[in-house]
Amino acid sequence: QVQLVESGGGLVQAGGSLRLSCAASGSIISINAMGWYRQAPGKQRELVATIMSGGNTNYADSVKDRFTISRDNAKNMYLQMNSLKPEDTAVYYCNANLWRIGGHRGDYWGKGTLVTVSS
């Protein structure tokens, strides 16, 4: 089994900061890429940022220069969110594309952590 567990969400005022964490565990051989996605009420899930195993990163235009994605080892990922805006309010999900023991490759998701930015 594979588990992705997010933490760090909460309520913050506009202009404030939060740091999200994602911890992957289970029968993982290697992780190809990890990313953060978010889903606001009444909207589709959207990409926030991704980070490849080699360290290359990609950001949505709406969060560039405000959010920073990082990994400290093969299985932990972070999202530093600065200058938060009310429109950043959403449930944030961790995603990993990985190889499992047994030779299976696939996409896995966490259950999400809620970020609420008040104006």
Image (cartoon, rainbow, N blue to C red):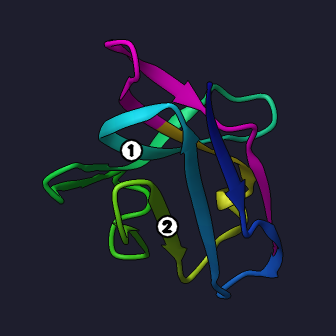
Residue kind at label 2, given as amino acid type: Tyr
- Residues in magenta, as a range: 96-119
Q: Which residue is mark 2?
A: 78
The image quarter in which residue 86 lies: bottom right
The residue sitting at the bottom extreme is 16
- Mark on residue 2? none
Identify which residue, 31 or 93, lies in the foreground: 31
Identify which residue, 14 or 29, lies in the foreground: 29
Seen in the image, is 80 located left or right of residue 15? left
Magenta stretch, main secondary structure, is strand
Q: Residue at x 63, y 25 (%)?
A: 44
Seen in the image, is 112 located left or right of residue 75? right
Q: Residue at x 73, y 70 (%)?
A: 8
CB atoms of marks 2 and 1 within 8 Å? no
Seen in the image, is 11 located left or right of residue 105? right
The image quarter in which residue 69 lies: bottom left
Quarter that holds the N terminus:
top right
Image x and y of residue 47, in percent: 45, 39
Residue 105 in magenta?
A: yes
The image quarter in which residue 54 lies: bottom left
